[in-house]
Image (spheres, rainbow, N blue to C red):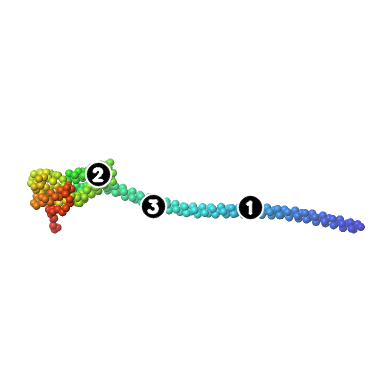
Amino acid sequence: MKKYVYILSLLAVFTYADNADIDQILEENETSISMSEKSQEKVDGLSTEKDSLLAEWKVVVKQVEGLKIYNAQKRKQIQAQEDRLVTLAEQTRQVVVIQRQIPPLMERMANSLEQFVSLDAPFSLNERYKRINQVRNTLSDPKVTASEQVRQVLEAYNIEREYGRTIETYEDAIVLDGEEKVVNILRIGRLALMYQLKDQSEAGVWDSEAQEWVEVSGYRLPVRDGIRMANKTAPLDLLAVPVKFTEAK
């Protein structure tokens, strides 16, 4: 009898021990599961954070690439501006040199123009010398800009050039046979410069070699008609005028 009681007691102890171990195992298992769930949550959180950081990294990479392109464009623009500054500096230096050369050049051109007028046929001398004096006054005036000085000199040259393509008549006093007489002058370009007395009784031409007025016969009517054409009181037509050519040597 004692033997059976002892066996039951051992069974109870073993049963109690097994139940305790199972509870402990279950508790540990629950703890492991909880820890596993927490670890999974951490892993999921890290994965989400990783995806977020990856997306941000991609955005930053795109921004960096954009900035690289932008900086490259700006470097090109800056280089172009620096090249432009070098060009402008060289142009400015050249402009300064040219500005220094303009006054003496304009002075030489004015002298050449005056010399040309003095050697040319004596028509409209008052007007032409007045223009030259005006140019000289402009060149000596410090208030006048270099561009205006150039403009007036070139304009004077252009007017002289136009004389070769126009016809005009005007009244002037010239010396004939040592006597000053008022006559009508007819200029046909630079081809012929003629005169006619007021009563149309005499006509003549300027002799550039002899540097004097010379009477010519047989040209009273052509000179009269030319004067009428210049005054626009007669239609333009062909004219027979005395022209003297110098043979080339």
**Separation of disc 1 and disc 2 at Cα?**
89 Å
Question: Which numbered disc covers residue 83?
Answer: 3
Q: Is residue 14 left or right of residue 115?
A: right
The residue positioned 64% from the left and 54% from the top of the image is 44
**Badge 3: how crowded within 10 Å, few (<14), some, or many (20+)?**
few
Q: Which structural element holds mark 3?
A: helix
The residue to which callout 2 is attached is 139
Q: CA distance from mark 3 to mark 1?
A: 56 Å
Side of 162 relative to 51 (left or right): left
- Looking at the image, do the residues carrying marks 1 and 2 touch, with CB atoms under 8 Å apart? no
Q: Earlier in the sequence, mark 3 or mark 1?
A: 1
Q: Are marks 2 and 3 in contact (CB under 8 Å)?
A: no
Residue 173 placement (x, y as % from top left):
12, 44
Which secondary structure lies at badge 1? helix
Please tell me whether mark 2 sits on a helix, a strand or a loop.
Answer: helix
Q: Of marks 2 and 3, which one's residue comes earlier in the chain?
A: 3
Q: Residue at x 11, y 50 (%)?
A: 221
What is the x, y in percent for residue 198? Answer: 11, 45
